[in-house]
Image (cartoon, rainbow, N blue to C red):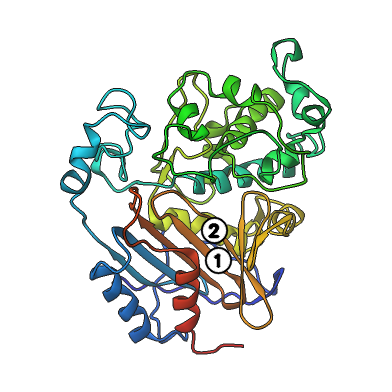
Amino acid sequence: MQKYFLLPVTLLLLFTTVNSQPTGPTHAWPVSTAEKEKMIADSLLAFEKDINGGKYGHIDAMFITRNGKLIWQQSWKNDYDKIYGDNAKTPSIMNAHDFGGQYNYYNPWWHPFYRRGELHSLQSVTKTITSIIIGIAVTQKEFPALTTPVLQFFDTTRVKYIDDRKRKMTIQHLLTMTAGLRWNEDQTSYLDPSNDCGIMENGFDWIDYVINKPMSHEPGSSFAYNSGATELLCYIFRKATGKDMEEYAAQHLFAPLGIKDYFWKRTPTGLADTEGGLYLKPADLAKIFYLWLQQGNWNGVQLVSKDWVNASITPFISLGPGVQYGYKWWLHKYGTNHQLAWCGSGFGGQFPVIIPEYNIVAVFNGWNVTDGGPSLGTRTILRRLIGAVVDKK
């Protein structure tokens, strides 16, 4: 385990007020220890041992920071050729085309690591990062108001099932998974051939597939997980700004944070796969989430406005007991005062989490992509990390 040093940063939460100039780990995460940052090392070690023993299935990385310092990291080498080798060669909704394709989720050349290297698939955590990129463009006044109707960016003579509900669908509805489109994704397994996400990913024109779905609900009235909605945001970004979202991210997000290595899959028509195609190292994903803990400020530069940061992690819709949703952010309640942890969530076990009250940013990567079997979840991560905090409030 490496150890770094960084001058401490004082944060007052929930929505942080920074009392000194924020500092970001642009070049490397400074190292400290669990003890110095008031966490119980034995508790984190017990968590690591449970992972090592297979309690949570196939976990690839555990990366924990507190107060802007790396206090714990571990990685595991899972033999994915052996684990998923047979699946990779058997055509299914998870592997509908050539064995070597980017959307063969069992092929170890592409998943979970990009070409067997260090970059890990983020899957739907890409959605959260897409929201962050839009927030940067909003801050730069390059992106339209969230109340803008989605159909404004389409030739409506070529869009099917237009009714009053589809006319009311806005950018904000896409951001909050309340678009109202008829979409079968979270109601069924990703192994189900009727899953709309799988159908979209196995098709050629993703945008055409999504915008031409009929409506099932009034926009804004109910939550329905829809990966295609985030791909529409990528299309709208291009139409509204005239810029490619990946290139924009490289200039305005990755470069300032010192992120040099990444890979971003593309759809067959050339758009960045914003619903699940980004690959990063755990340390770099943690940087992006640390930017949110710093209210969008990186080394004195306001990359994203505080207003956008706060709006994005303000609950827009409730998903049930203890879970709410913002602008592509999963918001999990914890503690007796029902504080909110700000989280991403990705297929297979991608879990970056921010516990703002305790200045914790952590990343867990895994690859549990078959139904059944053990896996790690956000609630477990929060319970075990908060359980390791010494100075609980």
Q: As rendered, which of 223 and 295 lies closer to the eye?
A: 223
Determine which of the numbered discs, if any, sits on residue 89 in the image. none
Q: Are marks 2 and 1 in contact (CB under 8 Å)?
A: yes
Please tell me whether residue 251 is drawn above or below residue 82 in the rendered image: above
Residue on which the image places disc 2: 289
Kindly indicate the quadrant of the structure image that contains residue 57. Answer: bottom left
Residue situated furthest left in the rendering: 82
Which quadrant holds the C terminus?
A: bottom right
Amino acid type, mark 2:
Phe
Q: Marks 2 and 1, Cα distance to the nearest angstrom?
A: 7 Å
Q: Relative to 124, is 148 on the left or the right? A: right
Of the numbered discs 2 and 1, the one sitting upstream in the chain is 2
Disc 2 packing (10 Å; few <14; some 14–19; many ≥20): many
Q: As rendered, which of 150 and 97 lies closer to the eye?
A: 97
Which quadrant holds the N terminus?
A: bottom left
Amino acid type, mark 1:
Ile
Q: Is residue 255 visible?
A: no
- At mark 1, the secondary structure is strand
Please tell me whether residue 16 is drawn above or below residue 329 in the rendered image: below
Residue on which the image places disc 1: 354
Whole-percent x, y for residue 110 in the image = 30, 37
Q: Is residue 337 visible?
A: yes
Disc 1 packing (10 Å; few <14; some 14–19; many ≥20): many
Tag nearer the camera, 2 or 1: 1
Q: Relative to 50, is 216 on the left or the right? A: right
Kindly indicate the quadrant of the structure image that contains residue 172. Answer: top right
At horizontal 28% and vertical 23% (from top left) the residue drawn is 98
Please tell me whether residue 214 is drawn above or below residue 365 in the rendered image: above
- At mark 2, the secondary structure is helix
Whole-percent x, y for residue 387 in the image = 47, 83
Q: Relative to 81, is 133 on the left or the right? A: right
Please tell me whether residue 4 is drawn above or below residue 284 in the rendered image: below
